[in-house]
Image (spheres, rainbow, N blue to C red):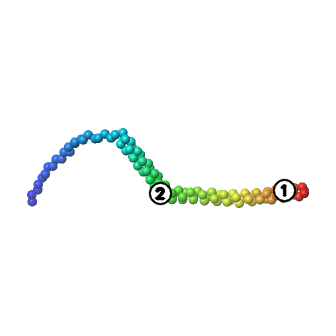
Amino acid sequence: IQYTQFNLIIREVYEYSPSDEASLWERIVEGFTNNAQSFIRTLETGFIFIVTTLPFLLIQLILWCIPLIIVYFIYRKVSKKKFLPWFKQKMIKVEKQDDHKE
């Protein structure tokens, strides 16, 4: 069995080429394009956020509305019981006054 050893040295050679400076109009177009892409990404991210959190928001809305609906119906039932005798008495008085006027 023979083993061979290699020593390999790699050096990166930096060669800088001068970059072409973009004109004013090219920079404006590039900036507008970047802003439009950022805006579209923001809208996509917002849409994904709404879609993913919508089930949880609906569950919370339902859990908050159930007690409110129960309290509303209890209040309505209690207020009808208290208000109804007063309303009947008021109507009787109005009818009696109408009878006296005729």
Taking the image as drawn, is residue 89 in sight? no
Q: Position of residue 77 (x, y in %)?
A: 71, 60
| Near-viewer residue (75 or 15) | 15
Residue at x 65%, y 57% (from the top left corner) = 71
The quadrant in which the N terminus is found is: bottom left
Residue at x 51%, y 57% (from the top left corner) = 54
**Position of 8 relative to 62 (above/below):** above
Q: Position of residue 31 (x, y in %)?
A: 39, 43
Q: Residues within 10 Å of mark 2 (few under 14, many from 20)?
A: few
Q: Is residue 77 left or right of residue 55?
A: right
Instruction: Report the disc number at residue 52.
Output: 2
Q: Secondary structure at mark 2?
A: helix
Q: Residue furthest left?
A: 2
Q: Position of residue 75 (x, y in %)?
A: 69, 57
Residue at x 48%, y 57% (from the top left corner) = 51
Instruction: Report the disc number at residue 94.
Output: 1
Q: Earlier in the sequence, mark 1 or mark 2?
A: 2
Residue at x 45%, y 51% (from the top left corner) = 43
Amino acid carrying mark 2 in the image: Thr
Q: Secondary structure at mark 1?
A: helix
The quadrant in which the C terminus is found is: bottom right
Q: Position of residue 79 (x, y in %)?
A: 72, 57
Amino acid carrying mark 1 in the image: Val
Q: CA distance from mark 1 to mark 2?
A: 60 Å
Give the mark count. Answer: 2
Taking the image as drawn, is residue 2 in sight? yes
| Near-viewer residue (81 or 20) | 20
Instruction: Report the disc number at residue 56.
Output: none
Q: Is residue 17 left or right of residue 78?
A: left
